[in-house]
Amino acid sequence: MIWANHNSNMENIYSTIDIIVKAQKKARQNNDYLTLMINAEALLEFVPALINYSVDQEIEYRKFEARYTNEIDKQGKRNSGAYAETQAKATDFYKDWTKAKLFIDLIYEMVNLSKKLAGSVDRELSASKN
């Protein structure tokens, strides 16, 4: 039951991030400096939860891989590291870890882009006042 709540919470986080990303697109189209920065800050607020989730999922993925490496195959040999890695990458742990990492990267890129866009909008406003 805890996993279900945890995954449900993550899906809510991903859904909220998607909403903010759509709002960023609209703010960019409107050259809305303030909204760009507010949305960028809102995105950053999700990074700690994504980092924690990412770390938890990587740990589970690595544990699965380690367990699989220690198992013996039908010929009485220990599973190879490559085979164990392939099996571990087929788990939801790996998928969820990768998804969280990619969302973290996306957030940082969007924040950097927001700062650049906001800076250019600010320069345009300053130039128009002169």
Image (cartoon, rainbow, N blue to C red):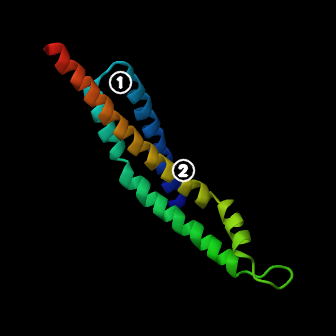
Q: Rounded to the nearest whole Å, what is the CA distance between mark 1 and mark 2?
A: 25 Å
Q: Is residue 68 above or below residue 53?
A: below
Residue depicted at x 28% and y 29%? 118
**x then y, percent, for residue 108:** 39, 45
Q: Is residue 37 above or below residue 54?
A: above
Residue 40: assigned label: none
Q: Please tell me which residue lies in front, 121 or 57.
A: 121
Q: Which residue is outermost to the right?
A: 75
Residue depicted at x 28% and y 26%? 120
Q: How many marks?
A: 2
> The N terminus appears in which quarter of the rendering?
bottom right
The crowd level at tag 2 (other Cα within 10 Å; few <14, some 14-19, many 20+) is some
Q: Please tell me which residue lies in front, 58 or 116.
A: 116
Element marked by disc 1: helix
**x then y, percent, for residue 2:** 50, 61
Is residue 119 toward the left or the right of residue 14 in the image? left
Q: Is residue 47 above or below residue 59?
A: above
**x then y, percent, for residue 111:** 35, 40
**Quarter of image, res 27:** top left
Element marked by disc 2: helix
Please name the residue that numbered disc 1 is placed on. 27
Name the amino acid type tagged 2. Lys
Name the amino acid type tagged 1. Ala
**Quarter of image, res 49:** bottom left
> The C terminus appears in which quarter of the rendering?
top left
Is residue 44 toward the left or the right of residue 7 in the image? left
Q: Please tell me which residue lies in front, 79 or 56.
A: 79
**x then y, percent, for residue 81:** 69, 74
> Tag 2 or tag 1, which sits nearer the N-term?
1
Residue 1 in sight here: no
Please name the residue that numbered disc 2 is placed on. 99
Residue depicted at x 81% and y 79%? 73
